[in-house]
Amino acid sequence: MIIIAFTFCTTVFADDTTPIVYTANMLDNTASIINMNDNSVVATIYGLDLPMGIAISPDYNKIYVTNSGSDSVAVINATTYQIIDTIPVGRMPYGIAVTPDGGSVYVANNEDNTVSLINTSSGKVTATISVGGAPYCVRANPVSGDIYVTNTNDGTISVIRGKGVIATIPVGKYPTNGLAVTPDGSLLFVANSDSNNVSAINMTTNTAMYSVNTGTGPTCVAISPDGWYAYVGNAGSRNISIMQISDKTIRVSLSAKNASMIAVSSDGKVLYVVTAPDGRITVMNSATGETEGAINVRPADMGAMLVNSSALVDTTPPITTLKLIGINDSNGNFIKEVTISLTAHDYPSGTEIDNIQYSLDGMTWMPYTGNITLKNARNIAVYYHAIDKAGNVEIIRSHSINIVDSAATPATPEPSALPSLTIPPKPTALPEDEIYTVTPAAASNTPQSTDGFEVLLAMVGLAGVGYMLVSKDD
């Protein structure tokens, strides 16, 4: 299909299979649409006011750009590239993100220390959320939809769900534009400019996991489409650190002067790097760092880049998560039965899940249509994987399950474990002139110490207590 885009009086023809880079060009008060196949500028959007952030709806129908000069968000038709609405927000809006369902847009208002929540249906701000000092960059978790905001002055990340902050996560000093999410929504990486490192955040627990030292003055970070590498632009040391995420190791550094923003092509082979002070885009080979071209637009060091990878062929397999539901004994065995639940998700710009398959013997595969309940005492392995609509097949995963008839009974201590008791001999009778009158002590309700007997009673009282595990994640 051919779409026609109008920019003033210029007509641009672009095939809808063309992968696109979108940039907000602060120095030119424009936004650019760039063809990733030949690095040509397809269209230029005028009428913006110090554009700082850019985002696109999940259906790729609307582009959202923050106007930091006029405290507003421009809504742009992604087919005609015309501004169709302008929405007032807070002071100095910088970063912006759209939720995965396309229903909401979140905008960081740098001078107000707030985030504006825009309802995309009404085009109105429905909530203003207080966050940390000088919020800058905004990213959405592609799986959960939670929103993450860098608070530059505080060295923290605010996590927003709906209309409220659910967590504030300490990171390094001066986190700004460097915020990137792994494709599966599990990890968030934050570039801390004044700490010379990146922080990794677990997006399930919303806690900082570890930090990795990089070059000097890291300002930006991007993740490869397969989730294997993190590319960190170090403005101070004029290079790009390539970190292998699985082992938290910097594998190599590529030379790049004053890198302030990075985007990765959907095949992972090309880096789009914004370099200061001219703010132009350098096209680099992601493996060798060799320059493959330049694009004559000027996002500068505080603009934004966004890669639309939807037009590329989906080559990324999906990921399946297994959950086991049942009652466990103290050894982790399931008592009498267990229920298996499987959930799969595709890469955010992928073609979605076609089906999930499972097997109980590793040979006979069946379609997963709902929860599976296994009964009877046995040890069994469940195998599973998913297939997306592009035909990408996930690697086969497996999990071993042990089902028992009843819970193991805790052992009762042997009597020999109790302290021995010695009965003293009967005293010899005293002569009459040495017999004393003894007044018996008043009766007391306070029990006398019985040492080992008390321990025994406590253990007997606990012997019948069982433990129930409602759900166990793999």
Image (cartoon, helix red, strand yellow):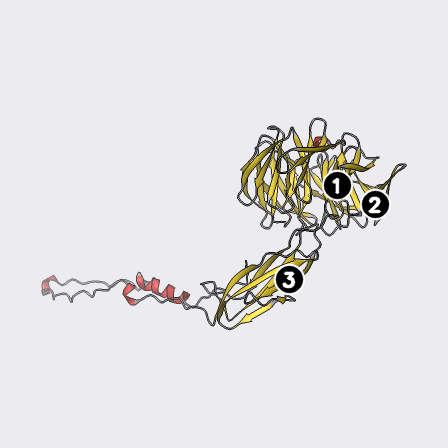
Residue displayed at 57% across by 42% down: 200
Q: Nearer the viewer, residue 448 or 242?
A: 242
Labels 2, 1: front one: 1
Query: Marks 2 and 3, how far apart in space?
Result: 35 Å
- In percent of width and height, residue 141 lies at 66, 48
Residue displayed at 61% across by 62% down: 342
Q: Is residue 52 above or below residue 464?
A: above
In terms of secondary structure, where does tag 2 sit?
loop
- In percent of width and height, residue 466 lies at 46, 66
Q: Is residue 326 above or below residue 259?
A: below
Q: Who comes first in sequence, dot 2 or dot 1?
A: 1
Q: For the view shown, which residue lies furthest in the right direction? A: 9
The label on residue 365 is none
Query: Marks 2 and 1, how far apart in space?
Result: 19 Å
Which quadrant holds residue 426?
bottom left
Query: Marks 1 and 3, how far apart in space?
Result: 34 Å
Q: Residues within 10 Å of mark 1 (few under 14, many from 20)?
A: few
Q: Which residue is mark 1?
A: 37
Residue displayed at 10% across by 63% down: 433
Residue type at the position of mark 3: Ile
Residue type at the position of mark 1: Asn
Q: Is residue 450 visible?
A: no
Residue type at the position of mark 2: Thr
Q: Residues within 10 Å of mark 3 (few under 14, many from 20)?
A: many
In terms of secondary structure, where does tag 1 sit?
loop
Q: Which residue is mark 2?
A: 79
> Is 366 left, or right, of 306 in this rendering?
left
Which quadrant holds residue 107?
top right
Q: Answer whether labels 2 and 3 touch (C-beta < 8 Å).
A: no
Which quadrant holds residue 301?
top right
The label on residue 356 is 3
